[in-house]
Image (spheres, rainbow, N blue to C red):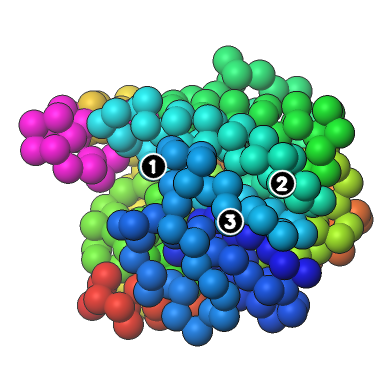
């Protein structure tokens, strides 16, 4: 099968590319002129230079392609110009799906996010059928991914073979940026995590997320969403697990949301607006933290053969990779 993959230079995309190649796929990989190609080392495939912001630059890459796997996304919880995020995540997805239709691409897997789900403050586990609307989305990243997912759903309803996968919070090696989840690990390893909030995440091994993309290509039902998750853990439990791996003390001070919000407010002003750098904490993150992002992957288990694996090995792999590549001592 000949597959066009976007996002292969990123964290999740790197692992998806490896999984597809191991499954025997012939890969064509989208890269931008400014892309760091280090994450493509060891992955067989031809590259195509293009940009989701310029759809016509991508059209030639879809010729003679059997399937499209669209992983690329602008994943930041702070951005100086939110319009750029919507252009990439929403407009880019809509136009890429159109180009795939016009090129006769038979099958599409779109990588959405569990961020498009409606989570609760009481920690109740949600699934793909939990009611949700745009009004439930906190911040530009979640709103842009929700709107992009709607484009994928509309395309499927119109007859395009689009399967949607919703990873939770992937963790593992090669998180070079790092992602917001990876940044939690980097801060902890650098002793910059003096306190914690009462929040929770679903952590998933990025290798299992990648394997699920391969499964979705053949087993997924068009128009269906599939949550790809691992373990539902409070932030304190995550920090305690990292402490057990590294020997670094886990924080014992729990801070109220009001204190966290005040800190994030000044971080955005001083670090973000005045210094022009990404803040260590944002109001968007704090607002998201009021809800425990606990989710069920039962549908993916039943329909795709997805495995819910213990996350401890992936956490260890992430820590070893961050240390080996200079992110932490």
> The C terminus lies in which quarter of the figure?
bottom left
Residue at the image position 51 percent from the left and 41 percent from the top = 56
Q: Residue furthest left?
A: 274
Q: Nearer the viewer, residue 87 or 251?
A: 87
- Labels 2, 1: front one: 2
Task: Choose top left, top right, bottom left or bottom right for residue 27.
Answer: bottom right
Q: Is residue 271 part of the magenta span, yes or no?
A: yes
Q: Disc 2 to disc 1, how far (Cα)?
A: 31 Å
In the image, residue 132 sits, relative to residue 178, either above or below, namely above
The residue indicated by pointer 1 is 76
> The N terminus lies in which quarter of the figure?
bottom right
Dot 3 alpha-carbon crowd within 10 angstroms: few under 14, some 14 to 19, many 20 or more: many
Sooner in the amino-acid sequence: mark 1 or mark 3: 3
In the image, residue 278 sits, relative to residue 256, either above or below, namely below
Task: Choose top left, top right, bottom left or bottom right for residue 205.
Answer: bottom right
Q: Is residue 6 part of the magenta span, yes or no?
A: no
Task: Choose top left, top right, bottom left or bottom right for residue 66.
Answer: bottom right
Residue 219 is labelled as none
> Residue 134: image x %, image y %?
60, 19
Instruction: Give the SS element for disc 2.
Output: helix
Is 165 left or right of 186, judged from the image as shown?
right
Q: Which segment did they paint magenta? A: 266-287
The residue indicated by pointer 2 is 103
Dot 2 alpha-carbon crowd within 10 angstroms: few under 14, some 14 to 19, many 20 or more: some
Instruction: Give the SS element for disc 3.
Output: helix
In the image, residue 164 sits, relative to residue 145, either above or below, namely below
The residue indicated by pointer 3 is 61
Q: Disc 3 to disc 2, how far (Cα)?
A: 10 Å
> Residue 216: image x %, image y %?
80, 57
Assign the magenta stretch its main secondary structure: helix
Residue at the image position 54 percent from the left and 64 percent from the top = 29
């Amino acid at each position: 099968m000949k597959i066009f993959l976007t996002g292969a230079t990123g964290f999740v995309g790197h692992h998806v590319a490896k999984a597809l190649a191991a499954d025997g796929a012939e890969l064509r990989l989208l890269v931008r002129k400014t892309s760091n190609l280090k994450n493509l080392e060891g992955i067989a495939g031809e590259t195509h230079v293009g940009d989701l912001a310029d759809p016509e630059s991508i059209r030639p890459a879809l010729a003679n392609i059997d399937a499209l796997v669209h992983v690329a996304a602008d994943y930041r919880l702070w951005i100086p110009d939110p319009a750029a995020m919507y252009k990439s995540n929403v407009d880019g997805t809509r136009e890429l799906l159109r180009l795939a239709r016009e090129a006769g691409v038979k099958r599409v897997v779109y990588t959405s996010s569990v961020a498009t789900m409606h989570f609760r403050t009481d920690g109740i586990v949600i699934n793909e059928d939990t009611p949700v609307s745009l009004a439930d989305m906190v911040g530009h990243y979640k709103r842009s991914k929700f709107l992009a997912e709607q484009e994928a759903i509309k395309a499927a309803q119109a007859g395009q073979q689009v399967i949607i996968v919703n990873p939770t919070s992937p963790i593992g090696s090669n998180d070079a940026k790092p992602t917001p989840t990876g940044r939690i690990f980097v801060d902890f390893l650098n002793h910059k995590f003096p306190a914690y909030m009462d929040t929770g995440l679903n952590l998933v091994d990025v290798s299992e997320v990648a394997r699920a993309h391969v499964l979705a290509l053949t087993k997924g039902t068009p128009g269906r969403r599939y949550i790809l998750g691992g373990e539902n853990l409070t932030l304190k439990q995550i920090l305690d697990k990292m402490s057990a791996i590294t020997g670094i003390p886990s924080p014992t001070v729990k801070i109220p949301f009001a204190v966290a919000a005040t800190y994030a407010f000044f971080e955005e002003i001083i670090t973000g607006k005045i210094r022009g750098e990404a803040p260590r904490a944002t109001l968007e993150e704090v607002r998201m933290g009021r809800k425990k992002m606990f989710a069920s992957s039962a549908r993916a288990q039943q329909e795709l053969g997805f495995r819910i694996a213990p996350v401890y090995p992936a956490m260890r792999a992430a820590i070893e990779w961050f240390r080996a590549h200079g992110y932490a001592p």
